[in-house]
Image: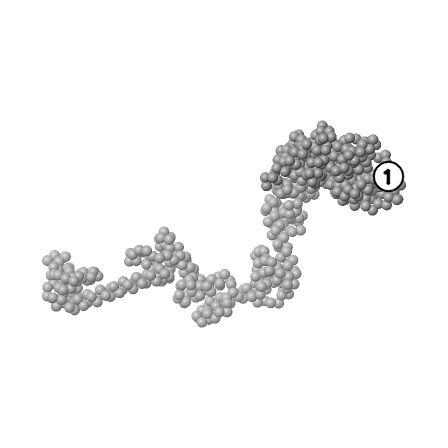
């Protein structure tokens, strides 16, 4: 008999004893019973033919043991599976997919649940499989165990991070105050050593609070409780942290003035340090807020330019980088101001010149020139250079300064080419229109009118009144001209020439607002005072044309010419009559009269005739 055979015989005997089949006589390893018992012992379910064989050989007790063992094994397997599910639910955030019997996760979670520290290889495996929540919990359990040892709470067995003790120990570690309910709970759990450590912490904090109150001049505040809002405030001050506005308000409300002064000094010191870093002045050793450098850096922060005294201060201390940053920042501020459409002040321009930033000045001037051209409706003027005479003229107008005669002459000599409109070129001429027109012309006359008004008020010389009135009319403000001359006492004016001039300009203003009867009265009265002056006769001619009394108007114009008027004066009045006519039929009537009388002299009137026809066609299309 071989050793193997003997071993199998002995194994068979053991199995027959285990499964209550000792009465079965056959002990040969070739027996069918040995085969059945081996299967059962390995946990392999026996099949129907095997069950029948056992029954036939009256091995019912053996069959019962096999079936009971199978049920127990199956129950135990189910128990293991349920326990695994509970562990995964407790320590993982992801659902486990796989065969639980063969995964290392089961063993790792069991180790974790029993309070063992995970190995490096186990943590790597968890990371690889994406069990980050499990790693976090493992770290919390380890932390919890350390805290329990540190705060003498080892006898408390639960290691779950969700446990209340863990939250309490973390508060102790952070030196936070415990709630009364936490203290009660520690007492109930008989964790007296932990409570003692907490009480030591509280005593240390109370001592610290007292020291801080003394250090930061807050001893007048009697409350020494650690729940006092003053305690965290003083801790913030001591750790060089900025106070919130509510904390500052609390100090003010409790009249802790000395503490506030210290806070302000520390805040200034902190701000000074930040500014020194920002403006590359850290090598300057003085950190006192009273330092002149602090004042200089605050000026930089507020985007103000540095004066010569401040620059010299920085130069003496070799803070050249600070000077460079200051100049670059202020230059950038001015450039940004320009880009936003704001005009530079004279002092700002001077600073740019002194610091050789002519390129920014050029940008400012170009931008300002474009803005002024837009303001005065001359954007089509092609010269964009700030050296253009127009730029200087527009600057004067913007400042309400009087123009020189040479300025006016330049405006009258220079023109702007305009794009063609639906009615032809503006002004009826392809070469464009003079700069001395539109808003520029009105502004010029308004400035002149204001000047003569002020001269009258300054000197009392009434000859300034007709000049002012004339300019108000040319500025298209006839009511202002009437207001200027409405309360005059002509009985006190000795010069008939002055009376005539005042009445003529007043009549012209009435004509401008189409009060022709009042205009006529003024003109006739002016003629009475000075029959030799052509101005009131010209006014009467214009009034008659406004009324459609063309022959009578011609008579008045002839009288004006006999008294020195120029035919150009008459032509100018005719243009005003045609241009200001509100009724198209009325305008057409005047134009036809003029073209019939002298088509060459009044050729300019054709433009208004064409304009009326085109406007009529446009209205017809509607």
> In the image shown, does 269 or 86 lie closer to the viewer?
86
Which residue is located at x 75 percent, y 39 percent?
547
Identify the residue shown where x is 48% and y is 71%. 184
Q: Is residue 173 left or right of residue 375?
A: left
Tell which residue pokes out farthest to the top in this image: 600
Dividing the picture into quadrants, the one containing residue 341 is top right
Residue 127 at what x, y percent from top left?
38, 52
Secondary structure under tag 1 reads: helix
Please say whether residue 117 is visible from this viewpoint: no
Q: Is residue 267 visible?
A: yes
On screen, residue 239 versus residue 465, left or right, reads left
Residue 30, horizontal then vertical, whole percent: 11, 59
Q: Position of residue 97 (x, y in %)?
A: 32, 56
- Side (left or right) of 209 relative to 590: left
Q: Position of residue 17 (x, y in %)?
A: 16, 66
Residue highlighted by disc 1: 528
Q: How many marks?
A: 1
Rendered view: 61 above or below 549:
below
**Looking at the rendering, which quadrant does residue 107 occupy?**
bottom left
């Amino acid at each position: 008999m071989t050793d193997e055979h003997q071993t199998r015989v002995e194994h068979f005997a053991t199995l027959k004893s285990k499964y209550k089949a000792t009465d079965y006589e056959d002990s040969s390893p070739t027996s069918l019973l040995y085969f059945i018992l081996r299967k059962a012992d390995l946990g392999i379910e026996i099949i129907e033919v095997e069950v029948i064989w056992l029954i036939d050989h009256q091995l019912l007790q053996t069959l019962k043991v096999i079936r009971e063992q199978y049920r127990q094994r199956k129950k135990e397997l189910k128990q293991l599976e349920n326990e695994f599910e509970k562990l995964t639910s407790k320590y993982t955030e992801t659902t486990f997919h796989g065969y639980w019997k063969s995964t290392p996760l089961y063993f790792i979670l069991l180790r974790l649940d029993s309070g063992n520290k995970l190995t490096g290889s186990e943590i790597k495996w968890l990371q690889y499989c994406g069990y980050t929540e499990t790693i976090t919990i493992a770290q919390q359990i380890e932390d919890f165990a350390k805290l329990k040892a540190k705060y003498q709470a080892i006898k408390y067995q639960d290691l779950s991070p969700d446990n209340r003790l863990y939250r309490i120990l973390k508060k102790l570690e952070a030196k936070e105050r415990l709630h009364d309910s936490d203290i009660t709970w520690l007492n109930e759990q008989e964790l007296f050593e932990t409570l003692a450590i907490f009480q030591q912490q509280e005593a240390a904090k109370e001592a610290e609070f007292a020291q801080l109150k003394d250090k930061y001049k807050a001893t007048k505040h009697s409350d020494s409780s650690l729940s006092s809002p003053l305690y965290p405030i003083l801790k913030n001050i001591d750790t060089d942290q900025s106070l919130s506005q509510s904390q500052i308000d609390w100090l003010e409300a409790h009249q802790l003035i000395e503490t506030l002064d210290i806070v302000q000094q520390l805040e200034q010191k902190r701000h000074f340090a930040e500014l020194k870093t920002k403006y590359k002045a850290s090598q300057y050793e003085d950190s006192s807020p009273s330092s002149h450098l602090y004042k200089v850096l605050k000026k930089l922060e507020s985007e103000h330019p540095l004066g010569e005294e401040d620059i010299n201060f920085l130069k003496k201390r070799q803070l050249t980088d600070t000077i460079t940053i200051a100049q670059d920042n202020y230059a950038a501020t001015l450039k940004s101001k320009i880009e936003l459409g704001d005009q530079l002040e004279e002092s700002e321009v001077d600073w740019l010149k002194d610091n050789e930033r002519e390129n920014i000045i050029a940008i400012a001037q170009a931008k300002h020139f474009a803005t002024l051209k837009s303001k005065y409706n001359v954007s089509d003027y092609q010269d964009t250079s700030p050296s253009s005479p127009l730029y200087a003229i527009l600057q004067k107008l913007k400042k309400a300064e009087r123009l020189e005669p040479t300025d006016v002459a330049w405006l009258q000599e220079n023109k702007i080419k305009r794009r063609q409109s639906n009615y032809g070129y503006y002004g009826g001429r392809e070469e464009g229109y003079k700069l001395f027109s539109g808003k520029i012309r009105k502004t010029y006359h308004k400035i002149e009118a204001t000047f003569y008004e002020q001269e009258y008020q300054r000197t009392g010389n009434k000859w300034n009144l007709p000049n002012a009135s004339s300019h108000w009319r040319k500025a298209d403000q006839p009511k202002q001209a009437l207001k200027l001359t409405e309360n005059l006492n002509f009985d006190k004016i000795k010069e008939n020439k002055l009376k005539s001039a005042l009445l003529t300009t007043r009549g012209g203003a009435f004509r401008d607002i189409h009060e022709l009867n009042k205009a006529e009265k003024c003109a006739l009265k002016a003629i009475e005072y000075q029959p030799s002056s052509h101005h009131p006769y010209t006014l009467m001619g214009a009034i008659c044309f406004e009324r459609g009394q063309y022959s009578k108007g011609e008579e008045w114009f002839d009288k004006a010419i006999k008294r020195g008027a120029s035919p150009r004066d008459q032509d100018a009045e005719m243009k005003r009559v045609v241009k200001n006519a509100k009724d198209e039929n009325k305008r057409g009537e005047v134009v036809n009269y003029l073209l019939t009388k002298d088509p060459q002299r009044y050729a300019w009137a054709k433009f208004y005739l064409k304009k009326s026809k085109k406007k009529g066609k446009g209205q017809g299309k509607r």
